[in-house]
Amino acid sequence: MKTTIFTSLLMACFLLPNTVSAQEKKTPDWAKETSEQKENRLAWWTNDRLGMFIHWGLYSLPARHEWVQHNERTSADNYRKYFEHFNPDLYDPSEWAKKAKAAGMKYVVITTKHHEGFCLFDSKYTDYKVTNTPCGRDLIKPLCDAFRAEGLRIGFYYSLIDWHHPDFTIDPLHPECPRLKGTLGNRFVMDTVAASEMNKTRDMKKYQQYMKNQLTELLTNYGQIDELFLDFSYEDKGDKEWDSEGLLKVIRQCQPQIIVDDRLGLGDTDWGWDFKTPEQTMPDKWVEHNGVRVPWETCQTFSGSWGYYRDETSWKSTNQLLTMLIEVVSKGGNLLLNVGPTARGTFDYRAIDRLESMGKWMDVNSRSIYGCTQAPTEFKAPANTLLTYNPTAKILYVSVFNWPTFRELNLEGYKGKIKYAQILNDGSEVQFREHGENVTLSLPLAKPNTEIPVIEVFLK
Ligand code: GLC
């Protein structure tokens, strides 16, 4: 487990944008757009709020974290056994799509290639791909078809890091990074002399072209792709090493409407990203860039690891997951919730359980999520509640985490603002009285029969 914690710390540092030079970068002509144009491009996404992340690759076989190759410093030769045994015989993407839809998810983002370099799609530019494993077929195409058939939008995750490509230079994250003698475990010092020797034959320019080629394949052979999640920049590699500007140009040429994350190392510019991606944390308020609120999407796991991790037991409860979703929307963000399918191509039983119970809640409460955002500041959230707000319908949603024992909920400063109120899951009226500047809602003693009850408040 130590390695996993270390990895998270390591990533927390590396995820800081590597963009000192990016700050000075002028907006290229092809990237110019008005804020209204950008808002329109992102409109479906800010409305939909909840997506499914899928981390699936060779690491699903060892089943001990998607960073297993780095954590255990596995050589390429040794890692090969997973390639030779990759055969998800129970893969049924329409089953996945139905489960995502039933959980209330509106889009999916799948790892087409993770840091290990293995491709789940049939690429012309590598042999290290699913079609050469016992599985023998492109897994991305049927996934796109299945999720689209259920009405979900499609997003691709593509790793900028590649521990398999022969031109990707050795750096401290690379599983084959040489270490100075006497350094221990993850607290190691890279042997820079040995590393530069290894890097003599490696050429990042060629790797840049490889990424352009592959992204062109992904963005032309699979229909409309709605979100692109590129991952990630760190101390050793950023916009210069990736040629981020060049990559983004190719991406926008292939799919002008696509929404791109902020991990290209262009985070300081206004044009090199569409949304911020706080990972496995809860921002304390709506995420900002230069003091201005921006679109954001937090990605979160059910259990800590992104890839399938058989022995991990730290699974979040349904209540925690729903609270997370409500809190994200109450701060104007999106939630991308991850499932790590098994080597057989199935969802873990614990993931299925959480998805189903989230779906039960969403069936009757999703009006407090879709199309919602942070409430105007004049509305204060009472203790143990969170507010979400639908600006088009002018409806305020009060999610109540600790159902009151005294049949009342006081809304301070709400006098004269409420037209009607009801409990959302059964549409039963909530009577209220006004006094002073406040409003008191009369609630039933028994907690409504839903994991987190929501009161729907129609505003004047
Ligand atoms: C990190 C990790 C990676 C995971 C991703 C999800 O950057 O390297 O394993 O895919 O976060 O956001």
Image (cartoon, rainbow, N blue to C red):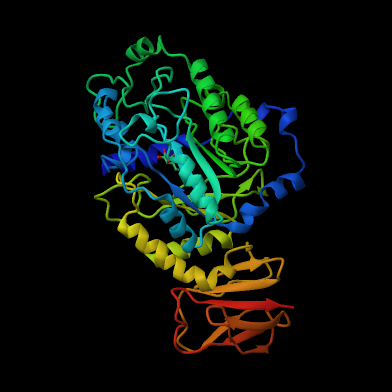
- Residue 297, relative to residue 433: is it above or below? above
Quadrant position of residue 264: top right
Q: Nearer the viewer, residue 208 or 348?
A: 348
Q: Position of residue 392 (x, y in %)?
A: 72, 66
Q: Nearer the viewer, residue 40 or 135?
A: 135
Q: Is residue 294 left or right of residue 358?
A: right
Q: Residue furthest left?
A: 182
Q: Position of residue 363 (x, y in %)?
A: 51, 70
Quadrant position of residue 48: bottom right
Quadrant that contains the N terminus: top left
Q: Where ligand 1 lies, by image quadrant?
A: top left
Q: Nearer the viewer, residue 344 or 59?
A: 344
Q: Position of residue 347 (x, y in %)?
A: 35, 53
- Residue 36, relative to residue 186: is it above or below? below
The tally of labels here is 0
Quadrant that contains the C terminus: bottom right
Q: Is residue 146 left or right of residue 185?
A: right
Residue in the picture at 43% in, 17% down: 167
Q: Position of residue 260 (x, y in %)?
A: 59, 40
Residue in the picture at 51% in, 47% down: 145
Q: Is residue 310 left or right of residue 226?
A: left
Residue in the picture at 40% in, 44% down: 55
- The answer to whether any part of residue 415 appears in the image is yes
- The answer to whether any part of residue 316 appears in the image is no
